[in-house]
Amino acid sequence: MMSRLGRNLCFACVSVLLVSSLGCNKPRATPVSPPPPRPAPAPADQPPTPSPTASISASPSSIDRGEQTTLSWETQNASAILIDQGIGNVNARGSIVVSPNDSTTYTIVARGGGGDARASTRVTIVEPRRLEPVVSLSDAEGLRREIEAGNVQDVFFEFDKADLSTMSQARLDRNAEIFKRYPQAKVIIEGHCDERGTEEYNLALGDRRALATYQFLVSRGVASSQLETISYGEERPFDPGHTESAWAQNRRAHFVAGN
């Protein structure tokens, strides 16, 4: 028979073994996966890149060989602007004086993130016309026909100026030769302005332009008694537009055959 001490020791060993066995079989915790990242918010709709715009004009658009004309242009939404015919890269807006030897088309190309834009203007070289002698016509009628045929040309002025440019003087030299062929015909010189400035100021400026034209013609041999001057200021625009091109057309001295 096992003594009480032996029985107690056996019971203690069994208890230890049982506890150890139960501890080894304890279930392990399952690891938890982190939640998936949230998707990034969709970008807000971006406005479309604006398309470039371009415009170009020549004033005047018809000139005699050797004369000059002014190209004016304006663009928007462009990062690179180019005008052909050797002009090259230009600013978004501006103007330049050119003197082509032959009739020429000038094209401007404006490039930007929204694409390309093109515009063109043509400068026509007008060959001088041979003046035929007038037969059986009064001087007044003969001069009127010369003006209607385009042989008498207007002269143009810079903004707020009454000075005659080299091109204007060359035109007036040819006009003077025509006027002297009709000494009995009255020539009315009209001074005109663009719409900028007050009415009173433009009337005075138109008068100075007509007077400068009058004095030049007299210096070229036209009789002062044949010439009259009048100012219309901004009252009678040749181009009703409100752009640089229109204003350039309205700053002029115009010739009319008197009765």
Image (cartoon, rainbow, N blue to C red):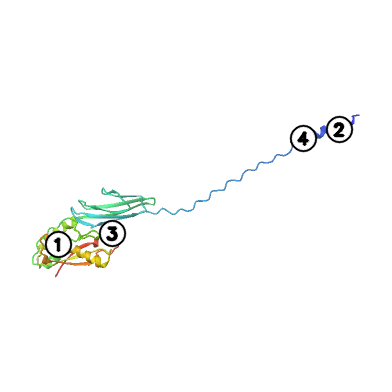
Q: Are marks 3 and 1 in contact (CB under 8 Å)?
A: no
Q: Quadrant of the N terminus?
A: top right
Residue that lies at the very extreme toward the right in this rendered image: 1
Mark 4 or mark 2: name the one nearer the start of the chain. 2
Which callout, 2 or 1, points to the residue nearer the camera?
1
Q: For this rendering, which residue is in front, 223 or 108?
A: 223
Q: Are marks 4 and 1 in contact (CB under 8 Å)?
A: no
Categorize mark 2 by other alpha carbons within 10 Å: few (<14), some (14-19), many (20+).
Answer: few
Residue that lies at the very extreme toward the bottom in this rendered image: 259
Q: In whole angstroms, how far apart are the C-alphas of marks 4 and 2?
A: 20 Å
Secondary structure of the residue carrying tag 3 is helix
Secondary structure of the residue carrying tag 4 is helix
Mark 4 or mark 1: name the one nearer the start of the chain. 4
Q: For this rendering, which residue is in front, 173 or 147?
A: 173
Which callout, 4 or 2, points to the residue nearer the camera?
2
Q: Are marks 4 and 2 in contact (CB under 8 Å)?
A: no
Which callout, 4 or 1, points to the residue nearer the camera?
1
Please state which amino acid type lies under the numbered disc 3.
Glu
Q: For this rendering, which residue is in front, 182 or 223?
A: 223
Q: In whole angstroms, how far apart are the C-alphas of marks 4 and 3?
A: 103 Å
Secondary structure of the residue carrying tag 1 is helix
Which residue is label 4 attached to?
21
